[in-house]
Amino acid sequence: MSMVIGTNVASLTAQRHLASSRLDMEASMERLSSGSKINSAMDDAAGLSISNRMEAQVQGFSQAMNNANDGISMVQAAEGGLEQTTDILLRMRELAVQSSSGTYSVDDRANINAEFTALTAEVTRISAQTKFNGVGVLSAASTVEFQVGAAVNDQISVSLLAMDAGSIGSSVTTLNGNGTMTAITPASTSQIHTLLAADIAVATETVSFSINGNTYQQDFVDSGGTAAADGVATMLALGNQIIAGESSVTAVAADAAGDDFTLTVAAGTAAGALTNVTLGGVAADNVLTAAGAEAAITSIDAAIKDVTDYRGQLGAAGNRLSHTVENLMTRSENTSSAQSRIQDTDFAVESANLAKAQVLQQAGTAMLAQANQSGQAVLSLLK
């Protein structure tokens, strides 16, 4: 090999390896000090992208757990209010049973009715004032969407109902089974709903019609004429609502006697059903007479069923949300574990890498010094 001093190849080689071991040492130090294997996109661009997505999921799961737990608290708030409502209704039924007995005078029933009325007002007050974070949970029918996942539309819907004294205890009757619409297949078909005279809405009732998954409700319309005329006016008003809301319904008619309710619908229209709802609930009851007390018993029994059914729905929703929280915890754990394998520093491995890099740095420095001295041998040739 030629002896030259213009280019010290051994020194250049030592410098290259020394720079490489220095970069390895600095990388190990950064990973050990930060606890993360990926500190910039230069370390692992694909790994950084995957890790960030997983981190977003984990944070989303964490907030979703909070949302689900808040949902459980909201359900519990509603159920707590309904528990008191149930106790009140049981006492109201007891008073109605008491007043229905012939052993009580008019004055006695007036005193009983005073407590009955006060309890009715308390049912409505509980409905209005039972709230969670300012949101009424018993005051009106509505749907609450709980975001219970990291992804868009990962939600659970819970239906809230009005539980005031005017809403519970109302009776709902399906009118004349022959009038229920079947699924429509022809291009255009008139569906006739034949109403019985007793089914036509009166002043304390409303008529409801469901079609294509939508419900339309019409209060009693007083035409100023006969009961039949009132029925015609009520049904036509309901029909006009349906036409306005359903493009598949093109015409509505009721005969002069108020007995026939006819809809003209397009092909593919979903089945519909007509119902009659007695309004007022327990709010319309009193126990001033034996007859009124007996009617109140029936109404209160319906109200107790309404409240019990709703409590069952809320309990089911609460249990579902509880299982959702457990599932979110499992998903968060598994996703965090996967992210850790990508992102977190293995201290055993990196400490070994650091020790190796430090030894190479020391050896490289020594070899660079030796390479820099190798040119001194040329001087012996010049003596």
Image (cartoon, grey):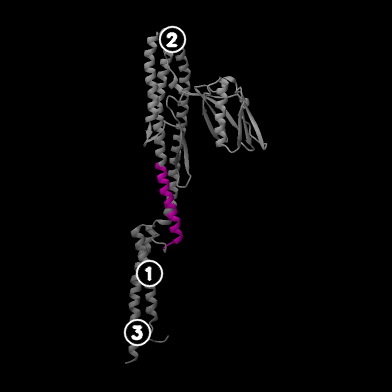
Q: In this view, does 40 lie above or below 294?
A: below
* Residue at far front of view: 224
Q: Residue 282 carries which label?
A: none
Q: Where is residue 306 in the image (x, y as percent from the top left)?
A: 47, 25
- The residue that appears at 56% across and 23% down in the rendered structure is 231
Q: What stretch is highlighted in magenta?
A: 43-66
Foreground tag (3 vs 2): 2
Looking at the picture, which amino acid does disc 1 mark? Ser
Give the residue number, with chain letter if any, for mark 1: 21
User: Residue at label 3?
Assistant: 375
Residue carrying label 2: 101
Quick check: is 303 in the magenta stretch? no
Amino acid marked by disc 2: Ser
Q: Magenta-highlighted stretch: main secondary structure?
A: helix
- Residue found at x 52% / y 28%: 218
| Circle 3 SS class | helix
